[in-house]
Image (tube, rainbow, N blue to C red):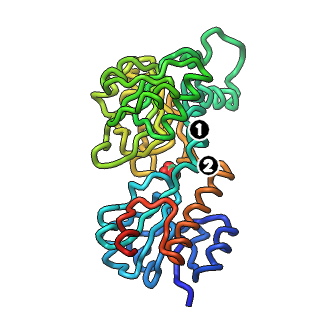
Amino acid sequence: MKPSILVACAVFPEILDKLANHFEVSANQSDEVWTTADLATRLQGASGALTTGSERIDAALLAACPGLKICANMAVGFNNFDVPAMTAAGVLATNTPDVLTETTADFGFALLMTTARRMAESEHFLRAGLWHRWRYDMFAGAEVYGSTLGILGMGRIGQGIAKRAAHGFGMSVVYHNRNRLDAVTESACAARWVSKAELLATCDHLMLVLPYSPESHHTIGAAELALMKPTATLVNIARGGIVDDVALAAALRQGTIAAAGLDVFEGEPTVHADLLALSNVVLTPHIASATRSTRWAMAELAADNLIVYLTEGKALTPLNPQVLASKA
Ligand code: DGY
């Protein structure tokens, strides 16, 4: 008998067909939003799950689903997984690194350009029939070419953004990360490590690309925003919760910083009303990795992790390889 798996989110039908060659597949193609209790109920008897960042896998869920062997996240971020609890329960966790790096870096740069150059705001103005003549100061935004980009979090996506900024836009790139990059990587990114305080004070544009964890909760709040230039742009393509959205809305209202571009939000898909009320913030619905080919690659990698683990005991991109070792 084939093992059973649950695909907790809508995916390409071809990916479901591929999974069905190996498993009894139960799928959520209608993309119904499930509570944790729904998820636990639907996981009864399942050996594996394909999840997104919306499904929380924690100790309570694992205790309720003793048959679960693997959760394959269709995302590089995995803050929805309690990895230590999964390891303790002997459940393999996998994510989808690498396949979305360049697409996400492209989007980060696009959101920076859109925000700094006030493209969304000016488009709404035009559509509203408010454009009557050319004016010297109409939607005058911030310079991007030749300016200073600050990057907080310098993993693969941060490095991709740094290369675009330095080599394509003549920007000076400064970054802050817990671990400083080696000299070769720093030089390829043309990026200089600085303290977090210097990063905030010197950058014209701040890009957030760090992973979410309890330690990175509200990394950017009122105190950090106060250190930034009043002309600065902030872009968050990382995770909601890294920025204190209420403090950010206040800073945007009061002119502490000039503008923000946000693809992720605390408590998404709900977006704080204070942000929705502002015109100097560009809001997108967590789509940084959303090109057809990248979403395909993410779905395929998640599916392949399920297949190789449940059929051969192997994994392509394990987050807790200790589980593999313990089963060897
Ligand atoms: C990721 O891969 O982490 C993206 O944010 C999609 O969830």
| Left or right: 57, with 73 as reference point | left
* Above or below: residue 248 compared with residue 131: below
Residue tagged 2: 290
In x, y percent, where is residue 184? 47, 29
Residue tagged 1: 107
Q: Is mark 2 on a helix, strand or loop?
A: loop
**Quadrant housing residue 24:** bottom right
The answer to which of 177 and 263 lies nearer the viewer is 177
Query: Which badge, 2 or 1, comes first in the chain's sequence?
Result: 1
* Above or below: residue 293 compared with residue 226: below
Identify the residue at image location x=65%, y=57%.
Answer: 296
In x, y percent, where is residue 113? 59, 27
Q: Do the residues labelled 2 and 1 touch (CB within 8 Å)?
A: yes
Mark 2 Cα shell of 10 Å, populated few (<14), some (14-19), many (≥20): some
Three-letter amino acid code at the position of disc 1: Phe
The answer to which of 303 and 112 lies nearer the viewer is 303
What is the C-alpha distance between the residues marked 2 and 1? 9 Å
In x, y percent, where is residue 221? 31, 34
Q: Would residue 124 be visible to someone looking at this image?
A: yes
